[in-house]
Image (cartoon, rainbow, N blue to C red):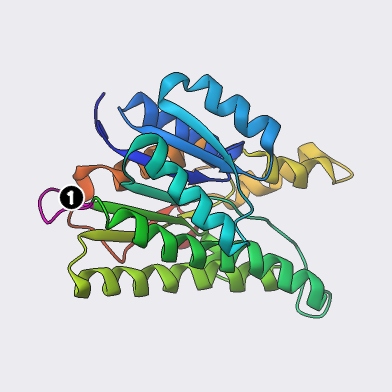
């Protein structure tokens, strides 16, 4: 308990999946959290479940003006911002031949533009209260193993998650050079039991067979749980990782070790 005591986090995509799990774990460890999402009903429910340590803002991560509003709300409600988790994202399965330009642009807007805007306005908000002492601020960008290795049917998703990986390094170096005491790292999960991954099972003719197939691709023999990523986020948001920036935290059950 208390690993992020006194810190304030903003988590995009916090209405479900990895974002929701991260919000719950961060609050358990002493943080206060602004949950943001385009899903207002579920987002508000998550914030209510966090009690006085939670708040909600409806937030389309592709819109610059809504990033201004969201970061300002964190400052107004909680008085500071220490941790930004860019968790909002979408998945798509199409090869370069099958992917339409419209689909490409939509994936890039959410997964790419959303993280870029998050870093831009996250840095601006965090540096208002970050000091030269302690661990300062932490930006945590959720990429994917698909940002490290390719898939034949993941053209847009691969490109967007690869962009998140290298953007994180650029932000890390920029903040270090400026002396902001703000770190930036990326997290790279594999298949995690979230609504987005479960949708892949549900759309298949034989959901159990697809789940088993995905599990066999993981050396540890099973897909991950949201908590596996949430605890990685707690670590990167805490003082425990104060000397870690521009790094890739891979949580993939061994897939990239093959």
Picture residue at 76% right of the left edge, 79% below the top: 96
Give the x, y percent position of residue 244: 23, 58
* Mark 1 closeness class: few <14, some 14–19, many ≥20 residues within 10 Å: many
Give the x, y percent position of residue 51: 46, 19
Residue 116 visible at all: yes
Give the x, y percent position of residue 12: 53, 47
Instruction: Relative to 41, say whether 108 is above or below.
Output: below
Q: Main secondary structure of the magenta part?
A: loop
Picture residue at 31% right of the left edge, 45% below the top: 237
Of residues 178 and 235, the one nearer the viewer is 178
183 on left or right of 217: left
Instruction: Find residue 124 and report its image quarter.
Output: bottom left
Residue farthest along the front direction in this orientation:
76
Of residues 69 and 181, the one nearer the viewer is 69
Of residues 77 and 139, the one nearer the viewer is 77
Of residues 157 and 51, the one nearer the viewer is 51
> In the rendered view of the protein, which quadrant contains the N terminus?
top left
Picture residue at 75% right of the left edge, 62% below the top: 93
Residue 227 visible at all: no
Residue 107: in magenta span: no
Residue farthest along the left direction in this orientation:
133
Callout count: 1
83 on left or right of 195: left
The part of the chain drawn in magenta is 130-136
Give the x, y percent position of residue 169: 35, 71
Judging by the rendered image, the residue that carries numbered circle 1 is 135
Q: Secondary structure at mark 1?
A: loop
């Amino acid at each position: 308990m208390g690993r992020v005591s006194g810190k304030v986090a903003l988590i995009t995509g916090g209405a479900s999946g990895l974002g929701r799990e991260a919000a719950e774990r961060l609050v358990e460890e002493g943080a206060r959290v602004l949950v943001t999402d385009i899903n207002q009903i579920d987002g508000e429910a998550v914030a209510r479940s966090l009690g006085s340590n939670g708040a909600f803002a409806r937030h389309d991560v592709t819109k610059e003006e809504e990033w201004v509003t969201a970061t300002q709300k964190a400052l107004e409600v909680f008085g500071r911002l220490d941790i930004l988790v860019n968790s909002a994202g979408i998945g798509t399965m199409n090869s370069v031949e099958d992917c339409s330009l419209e689909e490409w642009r939509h994936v890039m807007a959410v997964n790419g533009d959303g993280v870029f805007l998050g870093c831009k306005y996250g840095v601006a908000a965090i540096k208002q209260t970050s000091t030269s002492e302690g661990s300062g601020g932490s930006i945590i960008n959720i990429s994917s193993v698909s940002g490290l290795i390719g898939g034949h049917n993941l053209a847009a998703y691969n490109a967007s998650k690869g962009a998140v990986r290298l953007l994180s390094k650029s932000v890390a170096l920029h903040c270090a050079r400026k002396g902001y005491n703000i770190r930036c790292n990326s997290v790279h999960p594999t298949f995690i039991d979230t609504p987005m991954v479960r949708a892949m099972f549900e759309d298949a003719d034989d959901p159990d067979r697809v789940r088993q197939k995905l599990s066999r691709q993981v050396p540890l023999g099973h897909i991950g749980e949201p908590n596996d990523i949430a605890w990685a986020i707690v670590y990167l948001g805490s003082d425990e990782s104060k000397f870690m920036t521009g790094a890739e935290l891979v949580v993939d059950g061994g897939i990239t070790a093959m």
